[in-house]
Amino acid sequence: MKAVDLFYFPVGKGVLGNMTRAATSIRAYGKERVPREGGAVLAMNHFNFIDIPVFGTVCPRRIVFVGKSELFETPGLSELIRLHGALPIRRGESDRDALRRMREAVRDNDVLGLFIEGTRQTSGVPGKPMPGAAMIAISEGVPVVPAAIHGSQTWKLGNRAAVSVAFGEPMRFAEHQRNSKGYAAASEEIMAEIRRLWEWLVRINELGRPRHATPPRREEIPAKIP
């Protein structure tokens, strides 16, 4: 067990996980699709700050989140997220050091968590992808696990909104070129799967969020709800 796990499991999964479940009504689908070992990239859409603890609570493995550098300058919050192994990145500029640490994370068999749009989407629907998740996956030869979240766009402290998460099947991109064209093509594929999972969550929510529903496999187009 890594040193960071000694803090993460009792505090992150325990204390913060319970607080997150108290603050919102969470339901997760397809958790078994997250590889139980080895490096991987978890690519997620993003609506609200609550997305971070929600994904951290439901994912069966510790997520090495990548966050904007400003978060690491906030007293208290900075120490908390660093203890969870989070990595800072400077948005809007080239950050070679952050890229190096992200690659090291998957080489070290961690799950690297990236919000694929790069920032929160205020429209309430998934946005356009950035190339970071695809770049790391292709460069390091690790799978991407697409994951969608729905319901957090309406969450506010005190309303305990229903928030749902769906994990997709791991995606590999060995055939893609290690250049901007290859990263862009893979990013579109990842985002298409996240959108499909998100649309499935929208319909599942309309059905009352049945507990035992399974996110559709990629060959099931259009997606069908069990």
Image: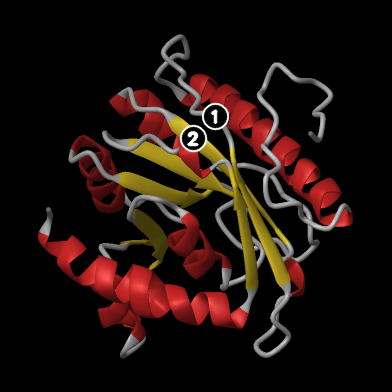
User: For residue 209, what is the image quadrant?
Assistant: bottom right
Outermost residue toward the top in this view: 175
Q: For the residues marked 1 and 2, what is the alpha-carbon distance in whole angstroms?
A: 6 Å
| Pointer 2 local density, CA inside 10 Å: few below 14, some 14–19, many at least 20 | some
User: Residue 61 at x, y = what percent?
Assistant: 35, 50
In the rendered image, which quarter contains the C terminus?
top right
N-terminal-most mark, 1 or 2: 2
Q: Is residue 39 above or below residue 50?
A: above
- Residue 65 sits in which quadrant? bottom left
Q: Is residue 40 left or right of residue 119?
A: left
Q: Could you tell me residue 115's position as x and y percent?
A: 53, 52
Q: Residue at x 50, y 66 (%)?
A: 52
Circles 1, 2 touching at the beta carbon (< 8 Å): yes
Question: For mark 2, what is the residue?
Answer: 33
Helix, strand or loop at label 1? It is loop
Q: Residue at x 55, y 54 (%)?
A: 118
State which quadrant residue 70 falls in: bottom left
Label number found at residue 28: none
Residue 82 seen in the current view: no
Q: Position of residue 104 (x, y in %)?
A: 20, 42
Residue marked by disc 1 = 169
Viewed as shown, does residue 140 lie left or right of 172? left
Question: For the residue marked with disc 2, what is the amino acid?
Answer: Arg
What residue sits 12% from the left and 53% below the top? 1
Residue at left offset 18%, top offset 40%: 108
Out of 53 and 25, give the one closest to the viewer.
25
In the rendered image of this protein, does residue 197 appear above or below residue 73?
Answer: above
Whether 43 is drawn above or below 144: the answer is: below
Colour scheme shown: secondary structure
